Amino acid sequence: MIRLSDDDVARRLARDIPDGAYVNLGIGMPNRVASFVPEGREVMYQTENGLLGVGPAPDAGMADPELIDASKKLVTTIPGSAFFDHPTSFGMMRGGHLDIAVLGAYQVAENGDLANWATLDDNYPPAVGGAMDLVVGVPRIYIIMRHVNRDGSPKLLEKCTYPLTGLGVVSRVYTDLAVLDVTADGFRLVELAPGNSFEDVQSVTGARIAA
Amino acid sequence: MIRLSDDDVARRLARDIPDGAYVNLGIGMPNRVASFVPEGREVMYQTENGLLGVGPAPDAGMADPELIDASKKLVTTIPGSAFFDHPTSFGMMRGGHLDIAVLGAYQVAENGDLANWATLDDNYPPAVGGAMDLVVGVPRIYIIMRHVNRDGSPKLLEKCTYPLTGLGVVSRVYTDLAVLDVTADGFRLVELAPGNSFEDVQSVTGARIAA
Amino acid sequence: MIDKRVADLAAAVAPIHDGAAVMIGGFGSAGIPYGLIDALVAHGAGGLTIISNNAGAGEEGISALLREGRVAKVICSYPRTPGSIWFERRYEAKEVDLEIVPQGTLAERIRAAGSGLGGFFTPTAYGTRLAEGKETRMIDGRGYVFEQPLPADFALIRAEAADRWGNLRFHATARNFNPVMAMAARHTIVEARQVLDGPMEPEAVVTPGIFVKSVARYAVRP
Amino acid sequence: MIDKRVADLAAAVAPIHDGAAVMIGGFGSAGIPYGLIDALVAHGAGGLTIISNNAGAGEEGISALLREGRVAKVICSYPRTPGSIWFERRYEAKEVDLEIVPQGTLAERIRAAGSGLGGFFTPTAYGTRLAEGKETRMIDGRGYVFEQPLPADFALIRAEAADRWGNLRFHATARNFNPVMAMAARHTIVEARQVLDGPMEPEAVVTPGIFVKSVARYAVRP
């Protein structure tokens, strides 16, 4: 199978971020999306730690150590930015004010259940952060992830086996093999990554995909 | 009986406002208290509409029409003032952050019940404002009022007959005849207005006063 | 590009439909969006539910909506200020419904709606007539009343300054209910005394633009 | 006269007793009151319950309290950042209890405590492991979890500037949990990068001084 690079998946997702959108990007792969949004679109990124209008990394020597994003990376403000406290930040999320959140996932189920905060390994202390607040409040939850785990096992499933982050919350999944919508009838194919067949993708997916 | 003037009752109450106190003054008689607090005490007055540190009326020509108190009177700021929104203002009240609220009353019962927002006259539309929030949150509720109604009937009672503002909330009552604490055993005399006897005051009070 | 500025007050209130629930900021005479209310009177929408702290005084603001018969219901804490003649007339004639909510509970119900909460327990009004028929609960030996979120279709907001992103700041005690109502309506409309050419300083923003749909200039100060 | 300024960080933390519940502001490395935490380590109080978003990283801040064995319990949303070695060590040795709370629920529980509410229903965590054993309710067809207020004995707060009345403002994303924690503790202690000679401008105040007990200067920026 021909797999898109992480950057190409981020680039594909970025095409679906419309001009004027308010967007929260999760840590890791989701964070790359910002750099691929097409020119001419003004997108306001929210970071849960109190900034709407997250700008790019600062130029050398211009860093402000108390101006960071949720992954603790140094960032900047842009024209139109605003600072606020945590209750306001999470009111934005839960209250349905953001348009899109882009998150990573361990597992996504065909009913839209999402598992992205804990595995079955109890040796680690659990850590949840803001993921559960985002998924209940933001109307469009886009997942960006590899289609399968490193051992080849599927991440798209009939039912999640890992602890859930939220129930029935995922709108769409962008992987290195396909874009899939979550519908009332389960996964539905939106598009295949170039060079792959529907059967190829179905064969590495743990739930039925409607074509 | 010898009755104190409203100003003298306000002056008496003002003596009990300590230096450094955070105080909410209700509309009407309670509002007069501020002008009688002894020199040298710094008191921060809160007005429910979003100002801590309410200053005196503005000088002629200096009025800001959007700088008002809860009774819609023009006010000023003082050094240390802060503006805030309604959720913060009522968080201050309910959260127990203020020290004292001074309110008027229709009736006070010996168990500390307060009636100060509605009478039994149903012709008027009801109106409650912030009174119910103040009484549940502020640890010391001081009532300033005339001891009896115009028709001579008592306002201090075994049980309120008017709709309640709050249950068991009153700490102390300042009237033109006496100062009374509300205790677990009912009203207790703190002091008599000069020239009155205990019997005089008891005779116009609708509940037993412990001397 | 994000640009929430609209041509004028009339354009700003045009989407308000008959039967809408409309929050209106302000307390006393401070922070009332008089320009937007006048535009709403001219616009003509009726059967409105008005959510505000007061119910108008004199002939201006909410009083004008009541006078013109546009209001089906008022949800407020204090409808009875001196001069609330139009509210009293409509209320006595049973032409308008009234729901009285303690002021802090009103603010908190609006905040719950804007923040996506399902309701909360407050000690306010426990044991009083205003808690009748409501769920109550004893928590650590104290009585609480369950209160539900209060959302709206529209909010009319008065700001001191706005930028094209909809960021707002307020003036003195004109802040009051304006920031929390801006969060709680599906469509928040702002009149700003100043509409800035550039962006507002990020630390000075009180209401982030995400809560705002449109901004019109109205420079008059009451 | 109101003057909340104290001589130094040591004087500010002196009232903190063994077994106290202590809120600590900050997210990542922004807005953490490092000066006050160092003073608390030197002060020696132990058996503490720490309420914060994170559980420290490296050898500084909350990590230092964990390293020195002063922490009995951590209530936080995200204890596992790269470098949270001291938290992990204490947790694996079962020397510290952990209560994980979703970040928005943590902020809202703290706000409920500071605002005198008895609890609230949130959709966050409904149907997940973090809602196990909690009261739930269907509201308009959607599942909600009941969450209780979370107060504290002390809060350690990092501000950009403070005046003698305790009014505070913050810098950039160092605001985060600091304002809400300042409301929720019985005794709120502030380190401010600048302690002003005069009053702060009333419109610029983010945390009104009523929520603050003491202010010490700590000019170091991380």
Image (spheres, coloured by chain):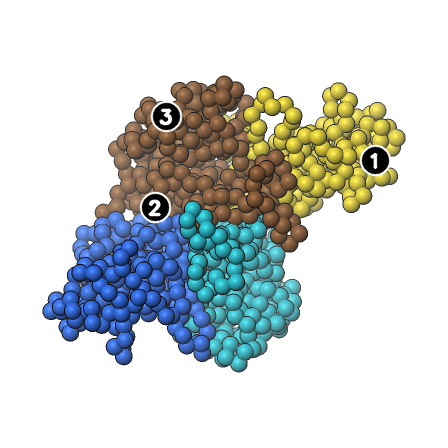
Chain colours: A blue, B yellow, C brown, D cyan
Question: Dot 1 corresponds to which residue?
Answer: B208
Q: Chain of mark 3?
A: C
- Amino acid under disc 2: Gly
Q: CA distance from mark 2 to mark 3?
A: 28 Å
Secondary structure, mark 1, is loop
Is residue B184 left or right of A189 when viewed as pictured?
right
Is residue D215 left or right of C184 when viewed as pictured?
right
Which residue is depicted at the point 57% across and 30% down? B127
Question: Dot 3 corresponds to which residue?
Answer: C46
Q: In the current view of this chain or complex, which residue is farthest to the left?
A: A195
Q: Residues within 10 Å of mark 3 (few under 14, many from 20)?
A: many
On the image, the x and y values in percent for residue D70 come to: 58, 74
- Amino acid under disc 1: Arg
- Amino acid under disc 3: Gly
Which residue is depicted at the point 43% across and 26% down? C72
Q: Chain of mark 1?
A: B
Q: Residues within 10 Å of mark 2 (few under 14, many from 20)?
A: many
Q: Are marks 1 and 2 on the same chain?
A: no
Badge number at residue C209: 2
Asked if one can make out residue D52 in the rendered structure from this viewpoint, the answer is no
Q: CA distance from mark 1 to mark 2?
A: 59 Å
Secondary structure, mark 3, is loop
- The part of the image, by quadrant, that contains residue A112 is bottom left
On the image, the x and y values in percent for residue D62 come to: 51, 71
Q: CA distance from mark 1 to mark 3?
A: 55 Å
